[in-house]
Amino acid sequence: MTATPTIGVLALQGDTAEHLRVLDGLGVTAVPVLRAAELDGVDGLVIPGGESTTMSKLAARYELMEPLRKHIREGMPAYGTCAGMILLADRIIDGTADQQTIGGIDMTVRRNAFGRQTESFEGRVAIDGVDGPDVDAVFIRAPWVEDVGPGVHVLGQLTDGDRADRIVAVRQGGLLATSFHPELTGDARIHRLFVDMVKGKV
Ligand SMILES: NC(=O)CC[C@H](N)C(=O)O
């Protein structure tokens, strides 16, 4: 890898543009990814939020599912937000009958766990590996992590009220996932963490 990594953002559906903007601001080469061949040219991949069922259907249609699995198996770093977290989960609860994931993180993720659109909320979460004040986290029909295998590092949990202890950020090796959307808040610290992972610094 050159000093400036190239980070792809999966562009099937969801808020690809917001991630590209944040990554751009961090001085990496940020490119949308829509074809399997484009995966060969990236050092890491962001899987945005959106609709995980739609994204997995489109991934199948664009013949991306197997290439994505292969690259992740072979060590491509990836960061999934919200629907992207669902796509990186080895197991999901409350998916649709035919819903497939890319997988990679040994975790069970509960889809739409916090409720419907109207129950979307903002909270503050301390993230292991992110210095400074707690991260302002936006949850939109968000999943939470129900359980994790022994190789998964829990990076962040909610602390307030009836949502206390819910796991909302995890890392396993080069794979990072958050239930929330840091690309929407103007706080680039989690993207910076991912860039540092891609660079092999952390
Ligand atoms: N903001 C989001 O990415 C929502 C995820 C959505 N609930 C899903 O199941 O895919």
Image (cartoon, rainbow, N blue to C red):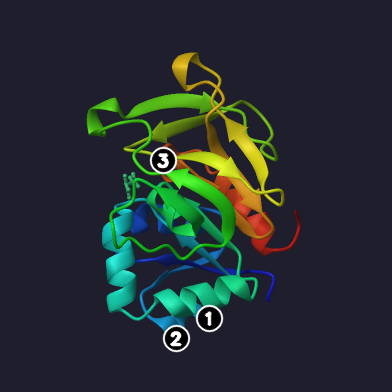
Q: Residue 143: which disc?
A: 3
Q: Position of residue 129 (x, y in %)?
A: 70, 40
| Beta carbon at label 3 within 8 Å of ligand 1 | yes
User: Callout 3: helix, strand or loop?
Assistant: loop
Residue bearing the label numbered 2: 37
For image coordinates 28% across by 70% down, the residue present is: 58
The image shows residue 177 at horizontal and vertical percentages of 53, 49
Marker disc for residue 154:
none
Name the N-terminal-most of marks 2 and 3.
2
Q: Quadrant location of the N terminus?
A: bottom right
Q: Which residue reaches farthest bottom?
A: 37
The amino acid on which the numbered mark 2 sits, given as a three-letter code, is Ala
Work out whether residue 1 or residue 71 is closer to the camera in this orientation and state it.
71
**Residue placed under numbered mark 1 in the picture:** 41
Image spot of residue 193 (x, y percent): 64, 49
Q: Nearer the viewer, mark 1 or mark 2?
A: 2
Tell me if mark 3 has few (under 14), some (14-19) or many (20+) residues whose alpha carbon lies within 10 angstroms of its own: many
Give the Cα separation between the discs numbered 1 and 3. 30 Å
Instruction: Specify whether 197 is left or right of 25.
Output: right
Callout 2: helix, strand or loop? helix
Mark pair 2, 3: CA separation: 30 Å
Task: Measure the C-alpha gap from mark 1 to mark 2.
Answer: 8 Å
At label 3, which amino acid type do we have?
A: Pro
Residue 153, quarter of the rendered image: top right
Does dot 1 land on a helix, a strand or a loop?
loop
Q: x and y percent of residue 148 in the render?
A: 61, 45
